Image: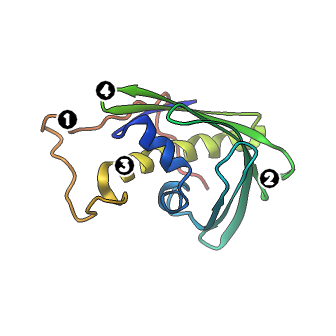
Amino acid sequence: TITRRLPATPAEVYAEWLDPEGLREWMCPHPARPTDVAVDPVEGGSFRFDISDGPATMVVTGRYLALEPGQLIKFTWSCDTWADPAVESVVTISLTARGGDCDMTLTHERLPAEQIPNHRSGWTAIAEQLGTWLAGAGSPGNNPATPPADPGAEGGGDRSLLSWPRLLPRS
């Protein structure tokens, strides 16, 4: 489980998790990138991320189990590079308003044991990338050339609330 304070409302964060264009930018821990994103954001709908990580490629698939706008997203998660690619783990994203911000809590259950370290560091990086995207470094309607806020200014600074220390990058 990780929790991260994000500079957006729960409705905005919820929308980002279902938007193919945004997902292409922040979904994979960089330098990995989705080369193709397909989402059918309805309960029972599916998603697919074709991912390139240097010379390695992988496909992540899943289906949406629960969608509660501005509050909750729950989906299965499987990867074709796992020892058993038929295994379906479950990711739950809970969103809580904190003033004009949002606390996003991500829990990944039923993950194969050998995948836990990579996913722990991966989800941590993804949460940070989503925070950067929402802060205006690339989100639609914002100017990516705008410098980040002065950390000493009111409302600036690091808002992350991760529940574990930074882990080693995935190999």
Q: Name the residue that disc number 1 marks.
A: 155
Task: Select label 2 or label 3 by which is in front.
Answer: 3
Q: Residues within 10 Å of mark 3 (few under 14, many from 20)?
A: many
* Residue 81: x %, y % from top left: 78, 58
Q: In which image quadrant can residue 160 be found? A: top left
Residue sitting at x 23%, y 38%: 157
What crowding class fits label 4: few (fewer than 14 Cα within 10 Å), some (14-19), or many (20 or more)? few
In the drawing, what numbered circle is on residue 82? Answer: 2
Of the two numbered discs 2 and 3 on the same chain, state the one appearing first in sequence.
Answer: 2
* Residue on which disc 3 sits: 134
Q: Nearer the viewer, mark 1 or mark 4?
A: 4
Q: Earlier in the sequence, mark 1 or mark 3?
A: 3
For the N terminus, the quadrant is: top right
Residue type, mark 1 in image: Gly
Measure the C-alpha gap from mark 1 to mark 2. Answer: 42 Å
Q: Nearer the viewer, residue 60 or 8?
A: 8
Disc 1 from disc 4: Cα separation: 12 Å
Q: Is residue 52 above or below residue 147?
A: below
For badge 2, the amino acid type reads: Trp
- Indicate the secondary structure of the residue bearing disc 1: loop
List the residue tagged with mark 4.
Answer: 99
